[in-house]
């Protein structure tokens, strides 16, 4: 799996650049370029399950937006679907895609980054740069919190099953079973985050000095070239937007 072998710095730059480009461009760039690229990338990497997991999150989000904007839409002759107060046409669909494009790209990019980047490699990549070492802490904190939340949520589902509560079926059924535990899960994640912060503080994570590590990460020349191309693409997009705005 080559995604794990890519330098964490390169993956972070690629992730942030794609999110930023999705904000600058319309929905066609996000849905017709970025998402197909991610699909091909996971297909080659044999990690299509990560792509499917992102879809499971994105589809309910888009459905919710479609329901909201469909109920607020105006009745016209060009409506595709009219069910009571729900109206769907091309204008509503484009509005939904434009408003959700950045969130959708963020879900696909961040899920890939968290799933296929280890905390150790991220710490090695950013620990020697004191000005941006917070990136490694945020990454480890979010990744560990998500893994702990998923483990605890599964344990709660098993406990709910033993009590005779139905937890099988669609996501709505599972959410109904988990809903009473949302607040305890959130509070436990916050407490775990504070404990990790104190642990890293005791271990000298915030010391402003050069660090020596037993293991080292070497960045390939192709990765450096790829980073330059991505940064150049972002700068070109910004200049294009500024030129259009000035004209």
Image: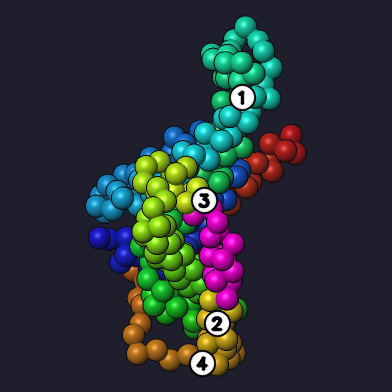
Q: Nearer the viewer, residue 104 or 167?
A: 167
What residue would you read off at disc 4?
203
Q: From the image, which quarter does the N terminus lie in?
A: bottom left
Report if the CB atoms under discs 3 and 2 are less than 8 Å apart: no
Task: Write down the region rendered in magenta.
Answer: 178-191
Report if the CB atoms under discs 1 and 4 are less than 8 Å apart: no
First along the sequence among labels 4 and 2: 2
Report if the CB atoms under discs 1 and 2 are less than 8 Å apart: no
Secondary structure beneath label 4? loop
Q: Would you place residue 236 above or below residue 144 in this image?
A: above
**Is residue 154 on the magenta stretch?**
no
Looking at the image, can residue 90 be seen? Answer: yes
- x 55%, y 71%: residue: 188
Of marks 1 and 3, the one in the foreground: 1
Marks 4 and 2 sit apart, C-alpha to C-alpha, by 12 Å
- x 68%, y 25%: residue: 72
Looking at the image, what colour scheme do you see? rainbow
Marks 1 and 2 sit apart, C-alpha to C-alpha, by 45 Å
Q: Position of residue 243 (x, y in %)?
A: 68, 40
What residue would you read off at disc 2?
195
Q: Nearer the viewer, residue 217 or 200?
A: 200
Q: Position of residue 210 (x, y in %)?
A: 51, 90
Q: Residues within 10 Å of mark 4 (few under 14, many from 20)?
A: few
Marks 1 and 3 sit apart, C-alpha to C-alpha, by 24 Å
- x 35%, y 82%: residue: 216
Q: Quadrant of residue 132?
A: bottom right
Secondary structure beneath label 3? helix
First along the sequence among labels 3 and 2: 3
Marks 3 and 4 sit apart, C-alpha to C-alpha, by 32 Å
């Amino acid at each position: 799996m080559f995604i794990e072998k890519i330098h964490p710095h390169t993956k972070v730059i690629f992730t942030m650049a794609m999110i930023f480009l999705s904000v600058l461009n319309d929905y066609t760039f996000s849905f017709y370029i970025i998402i197909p690229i991610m699909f091909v990338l996971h297909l080659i990497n044999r990690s299509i399950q990560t792509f499917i997991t992102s879809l499971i999150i994105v589809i309910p989000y888009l459905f919710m937006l479609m329901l909201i904007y469909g109920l607020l839409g105006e009745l016209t002759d060009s409506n595709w679907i009219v069910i009571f107060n729900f109206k769907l046409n091309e204008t509503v669909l484009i509005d939904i895609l434009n408003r959700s494009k950045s969130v959708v790209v963020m879900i696909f990019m961040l899920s890939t980054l968290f799933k296929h980047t280890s905390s150790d490699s991220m710490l090695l990549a950013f620990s020697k740069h004191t000005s941006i070492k917070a990136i490694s802490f945020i990454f480890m904190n979010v990744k560990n919190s998500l893994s702990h939340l998923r483990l605890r949520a599964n344990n709660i589902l098993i406990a709910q099953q033993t009590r005779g509560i139905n937890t099988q079926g669609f996501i709505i059924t599972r959410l109904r079973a988990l809903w009473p535990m949302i607040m305890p899960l959130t509070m436990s994640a916050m407490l775990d985050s504070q404990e990790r912060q104190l642990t890293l503080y005791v271990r000298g994570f915030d010391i402003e000095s050069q660090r020596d590590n037993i293991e080292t990460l070497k960045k390939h020349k192709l990765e450096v070239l790829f980073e330059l191309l991505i940064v150049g693409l972002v700068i070109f997009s910004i200049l294009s937007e500024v030129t259009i705005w000035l004209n």
